[in-house]
Amino acid sequence: MKWIVIRACLIPASLLLAAQAPDTGKSPFWDNFAFERGTRDITLDAAQRMGVFNSLIKDPLDLDIDDAEADIEIAKSNFDPVLTLNSNLADSDQSAFDTETRTKTGSATVSKLFATGTTVSVSQSYTETDTDSLIATSDGESDSLDTTVALNQPLLKNAGTLVNTLARETAKIDLDSAELQKLATLTSNYRDVTTAYWNHWIAFRNLEIAIEQFDLANQQKELAEKLLGAGLVAAVEVLRAEAGIAQRIDAILAAQDNLIITNNALFQLISDEEGAGDLVLLNPVTEPSAEEPTLSISDVSDAAIESSLALKILQNEVDVAALTVRAADWQTLPELDLNLSYTKSKVDKDASLIAVDDSEDWAVGVTLTYPLFERNSHAQLRQARNSNHLARKNVAIQRQGLRKTSENLVSNLFQNYRRLLAARREVDVTRRIYEAELKQFDRGARTSTDVLDVATQLSLALTKQSQAYAQYEISRTEIALLMGQVGDRVRRLLKGQE
């Protein structure tokens, strides 16, 4: 079709004739159809790319990923060394012996928790004592420096890497789920862009069909006027043709309104510029394919189960639940802790005090803690098992749903292909009928109404054909999404490999 640019908008050449026709006056077709920035040709591939990156701009898809990464850092921080500083000042007055003791104490302790549950600490404390007393043996000053190394090792409850790294490992799985969810959102938007593109393509085709019908009605009027001049038809045939022109003007206006709607819908998906859909007319230049499908239900189903992002997210939930069950089961054991400590003391004393030698002390002990009513850990274990059961059930339901969806989508794909073939056949037959009716009118055997009725049937057949083409393409995209092909392409786009 020939398009002419006037005032930053595209106008079909055939509509210029309508603007000059006495029954239409000033052309009503494009009064609300002028686009300030003109038109922009866009391919399906470009729209899909723009849709993916526009989603990254408009949607905060990385926030969940950042939260998951923060959870990992929080879990790791449990194993960071901890420095504890302590300072005390004490004063004791014993009136019975007329003794006053002033004590200053300072300590520094570094402790670290390991993945096995072991806690190791090293501390050093300094104590300064100043005693004023009438008793000679008590009067004086002393300084002491103590260094202690201690170890606490849980042997049952709270022991082992499973329990102590549970938060970190579940956070890692949650991070993977967040990345999968981001990809799932992008692939869904990819599908939405593709659907919007083909809906916009249908709108363009419907406008072209409406304009083609307008041209046919004008040709019918010209033919009727020619035959009227030759005395072969009555004047009413010209009036009938003019009525057909008026009907087709309404069809053009309706097609334009729909085109504006689909243009805005597509523009919002591929651009973050608010309201720009009213300024730019997107012209879809990619034509649909009529390639015969060769997929089988089993191939699609297997690929869907293998690549399903939703299934992988649910499987991650199963993994988290399984870890939680194992940890909760272990935590039902009583607490049995092994404690080891070694202390070395150095004392600097005043000469008036009784001599005290430097010393080394060590201690080893075992602590058993057993709740008399152990309900908390068993209740947590029950909850963990319930969550694990539900997670596994959800995976089974998702697998079954993928198989059913695969069956339905493959069936729809073949049905849409058959509809496409039928629509193409209908267009071919209807066009030949129209040409035959036109010849009959030329012989005076048909009226203008008869010819225009067949022309209307032709427009319906063409509309059905364009819809069949678009629906077939949308079906192919749905299957590509289900089989993971869309996800693979989105990954390549994000990595800059396309």
Image: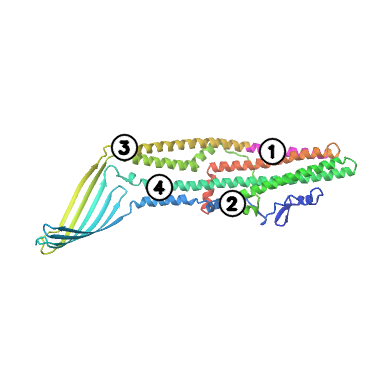
Q: Residues in magenta? A: 416-439
Q: Nearer the viewer, residue 85 or 385?
A: 85
Residue 66, magenta (yes or no): no
Image-based side of 238 in relation to 84, left or right: right
Question: Whole-Å distance between the Cαs marked 4 and 1?
Answer: 54 Å
Relative image position of residue 156 (x, y in whole percent): 27, 42
Q: Position of residue 11 (x, y in %)?
A: 73, 52
For the stretch drawn in magenta, the main secondary structure is: helix
Label drawn at residue 423: 1
Q: CA distance from mark 1 to mark 3?
A: 70 Å
Q: Residues within 10 Å of mark 2 (few under 14, many from 20)?
A: many
Residue 171 disc label? 4
Q: How many marks?
A: 4
Residue flagged by tag 3: what amino acid is it? Arg
Instruction: Confirm whether residue 365 shows in the render.
Output: yes
Mark found first going from the N terminus, 4 or 1: 4
Whether residues under marks 2 and 4 lie with C-beta atoms below 8 angstroms apart, the answer is: no
Query: Relative to residue 453, is residue 465 drawn left or right?
Result: left
Disc 4 secondary structure class: helix
